[in-house]
Image: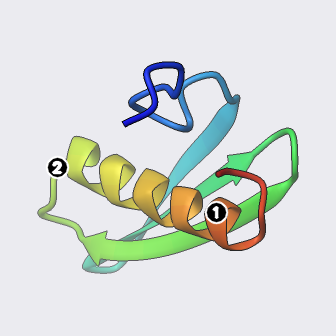
């Protein structure tokens, strides 16, 4: 493990997160302001906001890695 690598790769990035209820679901959008890459996920309305946020951030991290913006 690299000691200079942050534990959370999104730690120093500005991320905008929005929650939009749609019936029994919640659509969560997360956008990295540096790259303007945006993802969205859906989850049950009964899920906690923290769980939905964590899942959206994991998805955004995956997409940023896949496109070469994170190592």
Position in image of residue 44 (x %, y %): 21, 73
Quarter holding residue 64: bottom right
Residue found at the far left of this picture: 46
Q: Residue at x 65, y 37 (%)?
A: 15
Residue ID for mark 1: 65
Residue 60 relative to residue 38: left or right: left
Q: Residue at x 52, y 28 (%)?
A: 5
> Looking at the image, is mark 1 or mark 2 earlier in the sequence?
2
Position in image of residue 42 (x %, y %): 39, 76
Q: Residue at x 22, y 67 (%)?
A: 45
Residue found at the far right of this picture: 35
Question: Dot 1, crowdedness within 10 Å: few (<14), some or many (≥20)?
Answer: few
- 1 and 2 marks in contact (CB < 8 Å): no
* Vertical placement of residue 7 versus 55, above or below: above
Quarter holding residue 21: bottom left
Residue 48 numbered mark, or none: 2
* Vertical placement of residue 50 versus 62, above or below: above
Residue 29 relative to residue 2: left or right: right
Foreground pick, 51 / 24: 51
Residue 51 relative to residue 58: left or right: left
**How are the colours assigned in the image?**
rainbow
Foreground pick, 21 / 47: 47
Question: Dot 2, crowdedness within 10 Å: few (<14), some or many (≥20)?
Answer: few
Closer to the observer: label 1 or label 2?
1
**SS for callout 1:** helix
Position in image of residue 30 (x %, y %): 60, 54
As measured in the structure, the alpha-carbon distance from the residue carrying label 1 to the one carrying label 2 is: 26 Å
Quadrant containing the N terminus is top left
């Amino acid at each position: 493990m690299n000691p200079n690598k942050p534990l959370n790769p999104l730690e120093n990035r500005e991320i905008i997160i929005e929650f939009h209820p749609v019936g029994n679901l919640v659509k969560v959008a997360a956008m990295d302001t540096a790259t303007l890459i945006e993802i969205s996920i859906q989850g049950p309305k009964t899920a906690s906001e923290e769980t939905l946020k964590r899942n959206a951030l994991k998805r955004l991290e995956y997409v940023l890695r896949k496109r070469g913006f994170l190592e």
